Amino acid sequence: MKTQDYQKIVHDRVERAAKIAQAGGIEQALSSGALAQQADMTLSEAIVLGLLRQGVSTFLGILGHGSTEIGEVLRVYEEAGLVKSYPMRNELEASHAAAALRWTRDVKCAVFTSIGPGALQAIAASLVCSSDGLGVWYLLGEETTEDEGPNMQQIPKDEQGLFLRVCQTMGEAYTLHTPGAVGTALRRGLNTVDNPHRGQPFYLLMPMNTQCSVLRQFNMDELPVGAPPRMGAAAGEDAYRQAAEAIARSNRVVVRLGGGAVGAGEEIAELLELSDGVAVSSPIATGAIPYEHPRNMSVGGSKGTLSGNYAMDSADLLIALGTRFVCQSDCSRTGYPNARHVVNINTDIGAATHYNKTTALAGDIAPTLRVLCEQLREHKAADPKARAAWLSDCAAKRQEWEAFKAQRYQTHCLFDDEWQREVLTQPAAIKTAVDWARDNDAVCFFDAGDVQANGFQIVEDDRPGRTFTETGASYMGFGVSALLATGIAPEGFYGLALTGDGSFTMNPQVLIDGVNHGATGCILLLDNRRMAAISGLQEAQFGVDYATNDHVEVDYVAWAKSVKGIQALHGGYSVAELQAALAKAGEHKGLTLIHVPVYFGADELGGMGVFGRWNVGNWCDEVQQMRHEIGL
C-alpha cells in the first residue's frame, strides 16, 4: 500500500473510532447513520471492530514485529475510549490473567502476541482455558503468506501452515490468509469463546503481510454478533424414566459435582433429598452447595478427603453432574468401584457417556435436574432402611474428617530440617489464610502444587466464587498471575493468591505488572524450597525424593521490596504472626507479598493426607488392573 493511501486509511480509522465512541457503541453508530455501513479499512481494524461488536474491549499481551499493525489499531481505539490494552511482561502471565478475568467476572478478553516463541507461550498457557472451559481470544502474529523465505521466529521447517496445525491440535483456530474471510473467522471464534456451556480458547492467526491489507468497502454486517443458545433440559422421556428407576433401586447414591454444576445449587439440594444421596465435589466446584450442607462429603479424588473418597468408594450408583472425570478427579477411573450404574448429565456427549452402564442426559444441569426430580417424586425408594444406613455411615465419615482436620489445625508448627527450626505447617497456614479471606470477602486463587492439593481439602466455601483452583491443567504460576484480574476488572476486588515458592518463581513478573495495572491483593508465598507435591509423590512411591528441591536461600521479602509499590512482609512462624501480616496486607491499597517458611517432612500432621488412587509411576499396573476389574 502506498504511504498516501495508508494515511487516508489511518485518518478514516481515527474518525470512525471517534464516531463509535460518540454514539455509545457500534450498534448505535450504525443505526443512527453516524457510521457508514461500508468503508475501506485494514484487516486488523476489521478484527478489532469485530471483537468490539462481540463485547471484547479488554486486550492483554505483548506486541512485537509480528503484531505492529494490530497494535496501531488498538492504540487508536484506546485513545477513543473504546478498548483498553494491558501490556504484560510474559505471554503466560497475559493468558492466565485473561483466564482469571473470564472465570471470576465473565470479562471477555483477547490475548495478543507477536510471532513464534511469544505465541507458543500464550498457546501453552491456554491449556488453562481449554481445561476449565474458559472462552478467550488469542490474536497471534503469523508468518507471511507469500512464502518469500523463512520467517524469523517461525517454526524452521519448509512446510506450510505449521503454526495453524499446532493451534488446531490445541483447539479451534483460523488463519487469515485471505482477508475477505474475516467474517467467517470471527463467527467461528464467537461460537467457540462464547459457547454457553463450555467456552474454549480460539486462536486467530494474523499473517504479517495481511494485517495491513485493505478491505475495500467492507460491509459492517459481516461482523457477527449473537452467541450460540443454551441447550436447555435434556430430551428423551425414556432416559428420564430409566434414570429415575435406577436411582430408586439404589441404596448408596453419590452425586459428583463438576464445574458444570456450579449455579445449580437449589436443584442439587433437591436431588440429594429425593435420592437420599450425598455429594462429592471436584476442586473446581467447591461452593456449588455450601460446605456445611449435611449431605456434602467435600472433595473426592486422588487427593480428595477422607469423607469424599469414602462416599465414592462405597456408592452403588453415581449421578455425575457437569464433570469431565479428569484423572485425579475419579482416581484414574477407579473412583467408583461399587457403582452398578451411572446417571450422567452433561452438555458434552463425550463426557456424558464416559462410563459404561450409563444413562446419559445431554442438557443443561439445572433444567434437566428439575425434570429428573419430577420423575423421582413418582418413585419410592426400594429399601429405605438401607438408605438411612448410608446417610448415617457418610455422616460418621464426615465427622471423622472434621476431627482429622482439627488435629492438623491444632498442630501449628513442626521442626523442619531445611529451616532448622519450627515453622508453620501448610494446613495451619492455609486454614489461617482462607478463614481471613472469607471474613474479608477476598477471592482465593490457588496455584498448582502441594499448596493447591492441601488447599482444596481445606476450603469450606458457602457459595461459588470464593475459591478458584486451576486443577484442569494444574498450571504452575496461574494463581499469582490471576491477581492481575483485580486491577483490570471493571469492578475491582481483593484477591489472595496462595502459592508455593516453585509456582511463584515461574511468574514473578506479576510484581511489576501488578503495580502497573493496579492489582489489589496478596501473594501468600508458602516456601519449603521444593516442589513438595512431587517430592511427596516420590517418597510415597520410591522412599526418596530426587531433583525436586534445592538449598538456595532466597530473600523473597527483599525481592518484592525492590519493586516500588509492593508491600513485602514476613509471615512469621506462628498463626498469630501470619494473621497480623494478613491484616496489614488487607489495609494496603495495592499488592502485598507475604513470605512464610513452611514444613516439609514425614510427620503426618504436616499435610492433609492422600486417600485415593492415581495412575502414575509405579502405581500404574495396580490401578490399571483395578480399573479393568471394575469395568465401569
Image: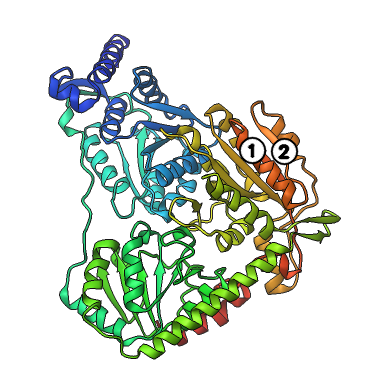
- The residue beneath circle 2 is 569
- Looking at the picture, how far across and down is residue 610, in whole percent? 61, 71
Position of residue 384 in the picture relative to residue 439 (left or right): left
The N terminus sits in image quarter: top left
Kind of residue sitting beneath label 2: Leu
Task: State whether residue 378 is above or below residue 126.
Answer: below
Residue 6 horizontal/vertical position (percent): 30, 14
Nearest the viewer among 141 and 562 is 562
Q: Is residue 18 above or below residue 382?
A: above
Query: At which x and y percent is residue 614?
Result: 55, 73
Label disc, if present, on residue 467 of the rendered structure = none
Along the line of sight, which residue is nearer the eye, 117 or 71?
Answer: 71
Task: Check disc 1 and give the amino acid type.
Answer: Ala
Cβ–Cβ below 8 Å for labels 1 and 2?
yes
Horizontal placement of 377 versus 594: left or right? left
Q: CA distance from mark 1 to mark 2?
A: 8 Å
Which of the two discs, 1 and 2, sits closer to the camera? 1
- Crowding around mark 2 (Cα neighbors within 10 Å: few <14, some 14 to 19, many 20+) is many
The residue positioned 24% from the left and 66% from the top of the image is 370
Secondary structure state at the residue bearing disc 1: helix
Residue at horizontal 62%, vertical 34%?
Answer: 587
Image-quadrant location for residue 376: bottom left
Q: Give the residue pinned by disc 1.
A: 585
Residue 41 quadrant: top left
